[in-house]
Amino acid sequence: MYGYRKGDIGLLRLFLPRELHVVFKAIHKMERSLRDLIARNQTEEFRGVYLEGGLNPTRRNVLAPGSIGVYTGGSTYNPAQVIRDDSVTAATEKINRLVKDHEDKKCGEVPIDLLAELIGATVPDPSASERVWDAKAVAESLVQYGKLAGQDSGYLYVDRDRGLKESRYETQGILTGGEAGTVRSDKVTLFLLRTRSEGGSHASWWPQIRFPNGRYAFAFAI
């Protein structure tokens, strides 16, 4: 937005409302993830960005800031925070039923459609959003990945009664102690952790998605 000012970057200051600050940070994170993906694949093999949500890649007019997001192969995404009041009771109970047969700290192979349904049932906190996590875009990207990779299943890792409280960056992850390494990375993976009900807070499911490594990216309209 400032043009080519690398030599003057130390003198530049940007003042803007918090909402735009959040949007610009999201754009930066997703653009950086795309640049990192291309850097890892420096041949001409990587060319495609798969479009979701009716996005027009040519943009006839100026595109609204924050209206484009990108998920890249090998990356992890999660909501910054989840709602923890009594409004999430029904959603929490629904997910409880869907994962009732899954043991804590165990990984199982399930249909991608179930992963998408579980993501859609979670309740992120919009007041903490960084505009990177979008439940609909994540779910659609999982389904699209399955079609591209010829896979109709992914991995589901469940754990309950976790003491998760602090907000996270939406590309930071919510796992601890090397948990992600216990699950194979050849399929899409949903790590689903249920927060502990304590101190007036209700139990709530907090999702984290991991895309397998590869030369692909999904762009979507928010």
Image (cartoon, rainbow, N blue to C red):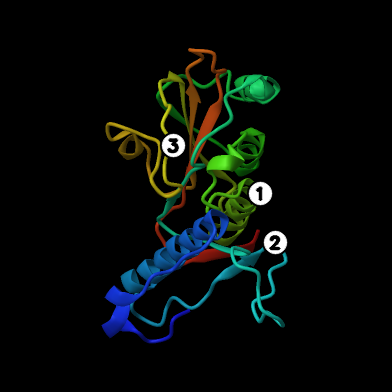
Which residue position is annotated with label 3?
167
In-front residue for pair 49/69: 69
Which comes before the other along the chain, label 2 or label 3? Answer: 2
How many marks on residues? 3
Amino acid type at image mark 1: Lys
Question: Of helix, strand and loop, which one carries label 3?
Answer: loop
Which residue position is annotated with label 1?
136
Amino acid type at image mark 2: Gly
Q: With 204 as the anchor, is 160 left or right in this view?
A: left
Amino acid type at image mark 3: Ser
Q: Report, in whole angstroms, how far the alpha carbon at label 1 lies from the one at label 2.
A: 9 Å
Foreground tag (2 vs 3): 3
Which residue position is annotated with label 2?
53
Q: Report, in whole angstroms, how far the alpha carbon at label 2 lies from the one at label 3.
A: 27 Å
In the rendered view, tell whether residue 92 sits above or below residue 37: above
In-front residue for pair 167/194: 167
- Report if the CB atoms under discs 1 and 2 are less than 8 Å apart: yes
Query: In which quadrant will I find the C terminus?
Result: bottom right
